[in-house]
Every structure is written in structure tokens, then in C-alpha cells.
Amino acid sequence: MESVGIVAPQRMQFSQPLALQNGSALAGYELMVETYGTLNAARSNAVLVCHALNASHHVAGTYAGEPKNVGWWDNMVGPGKPLDTNRFFVIGVNNLGSCFGSTGPMSIDPATGRPFGASFPVVTVEDWVHAQARVADAFGIERFAAVMGGSLGGMQALAWSMMYPERVAHCIDIASTPKLSAQNIAFNEVARSAILSDPDFHGGDYYAHGVKPKRGLRVARMIGHITYLSDDDMATKFGRALRRENGSVGAAEAYNFSFDVEFEVESYLRYQGEKFADYFDANTYLLLTRALDYFDPAKAFGGDLTAALALTSARYLVISFATDWRFAPARSREIVKALLDNKRHVTYAEIDAPHGHDAFLLDDARYHNAVRAYYERIAEEVGA
């Protein structure tokens, strides 16, 4: 299977104010967008891919001169891949509040001439969906063949099917949930606390001080990364292997009896934390984890998810992974049950993959075949 090859993002500007769920509004904003494939004459083969917490509009392919900068879902999207760009026109949008080019805390506030920083408004999944709808309008797309996402992206796909039912033919919801559990909110709070307590955070206005709260970001990423992997996957990858200064690993070697890196898993987490702190923005991390916390479409219906999904009209593919304890299969089954209660057409797959929550990003033949088969049916519908 081929890659989509060299791609280039585009910056889309929107001057019409966007009313936000918190009661405020953005007077104007920009969104970074990437597209793959060709939009057909009927504009019926468009698929919106919604990104998760630390991803972006760069869904597939690479950038000129940056061969290692591969799109975050490149194994899923491309010629001959499950979401086949020979048949579908795929759109990736970087959400408001992110740090990859769309308007967010790092952007200049026209009212002050300085970065928004901590003053950037709290945004929600629903706000993102409204902004994405304007992207669809700009392309002349009245109805998506599918809206697809994993994790936080799955929340957006589900929200699309509820907020714009007439504009979504199929909703593909992967490794997601109708709302966070108390445990999930707790993990997010600990991660945010690590950032907020970093001396370099400066109340969110660290840009003016020429610093970055890297220590807090490192800890936040380490906490998050633990929740993305299953216990079995961590045991297989690292076990209790010890790491030595020369890089060698040996489970039977003696301890150093220190607080330096002793175990291979510690080294892995620190590496992930360091890498993340180099490219991600702390204010964005706060905003996106809050969007996760606030998502609860059934709240307005007294907690009744069946009632919340009553006005939907899309067909659904819902996929979960057996070892995902962050967004467990039971949460996906809640969505499936509520849809079936409304007599919606639902295809459900629970994949027995060992990788935990991260499985939605990885190559699993059963998972990819399920997605591929579903898109085959969509392609027949739209004549792609």
C-alpha cells in the first residue's frame, strides 16, 4: 500500500464570530486543514477525520524535506488503505485551541497584540464540531459520507451525528466513550496539576517570560502514557528489566539503589515525556483535557444517552479494544445499546488486541479489515 506522499497544509480564515458553549465568542479565527484524495463532482465522497488529544490536521503523508514527519494515522488513510484516498476525499482539521497552527493560546490576541495565553477561552467538543462544519461549508460539502475519529476524535464523530444529523451519513467511533468516568477525569486533573504547579507556568502566560513549563508537561505526558498502554503490553515491552548507563538491559543485574532511572519502563516514560514537552504547548494540554472532561451529550437529557441520540439518523461503526482500560469496551457498548434502543443501524466490533487504548493507532489486521469492509460499503453507496 502506498502513502499519499508529499502533502501540504492550508490555512483557512473565518471572519464570522463563533459562539462558544461557555457563552463567549471568537470574533475571528484560523484553522489548519489538510486534504487527501479528490472530491467528486457530487461532493458525496468526503470523509472528515477528527483528531485526538495530541494529534493535528496532519493525518497522512509527509511534508517536503521532512520525511520523518509522518501523519498520525498514515497506516489508516491513503491509497489502498482502509480509508482509501483513491475513492474518498479526506479532510483533517486542527482544532481550535491546539498548538499546530489553528487559533489557540499561542496565537496573537488582536485586542492586546500579545499571545492569548491563559485568556484563550475554554473550548468544547461541540465548539470544534461547529467550527468543522464551517470548513465543510467552505468546501461546498453538504453531507459527509463519514465522520471518523478515535478517542477524543471519536467524541467529535459522535457529536457530529447528534448536532448535524442531516450532514452525516456514517459515524465511525473508535476507542471512545459517551463521557469520561470519574477515574479518567482524575487522571486529567493530576496531569493538569503537574503543569499548573510548574514554576515556569506563570499563570499560563509563560510566552512573555521566554520559558516553557517543560517539567509539568513531562509529568503530564508520563501520566497520560501509562493510561494509553495495557498492563500486558507494558509487561511484554519492559517487564522488570533494568536499564544501565551503557544502555544495556538485564533483568538479573543488581540494583543501583538510587532514584536515577533503574527500570526500562522508567526510561521509556521519561523519553516520551521529554519528546512531548519539546513540541507540545502546556496551555493546549489544559484546554484539550478539559474538553475531554466536559463532553457529556446525555447531560442535557438527564443522563439518558438513548434520549440524547434520538434525533440521529446516521449509520454507525463502533469499535473498541478488549485491553483498553482508559475507554473500556463497556463504554462503547453503552453507545451501541443507546443506538439500538433508537433502532439505528449499528455495526460493532470488539477487537482482542493487547495494546490498550493506543491500539486504535496501531496496525491490527482484524481492526483494519473491519474498517476497510465498512468503507467498502460506503464507497458503493456514493459510487466511489
Image (spheres, rainbow, N blue to C red):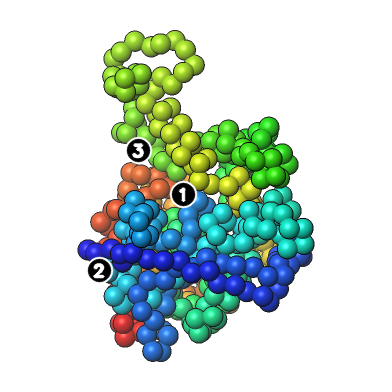
Q: Is residue 43 visible?
A: yes
Residue 233: mark in rendering:
3
Q: Earlier in the sequence, mark 1 or mark 3?
A: 3
Query: In front: 110, or 16?
Result: 110
Task: Describe residue 26's horizontal placement relative to residue 347 as left or right.
Answer: right
Task: Describe residue 317's horizontal placement relative to residue 370 as left or right.
Answer: right
The CA span between labels 1 and 2 is 30 Å
The CA span between labels 3 and 2 is 29 Å
Query: In front: 276, or 312?
Result: 276
* SS at mark 3 in the image: helix
Q: Residues within 10 Å of mark 2 (few under 14, many from 20)?
A: some
Q: Is residue 291 visible?
A: no
Coordinates of residue 338 in the picture (x, y in percent): 52, 66
Which residue is disc 2 drawn over?
80
Q: Earlier in the sequence, mark 3 or mark 2?
A: 2
Q: Residue at x 70, y 44 (%)?
A: 208
Coordinates of residue 75 in the picture (x, y in percent): 31, 58
Q: Do labels 1 and 2 touch, CB within 8 Å? A: no
Vertical relation: 289 (above or below) 108:
above
Coordinates of residue 146 in the picture (x, y in percent): 43, 74
Vertical relation: 363 (above or below) 215:
below
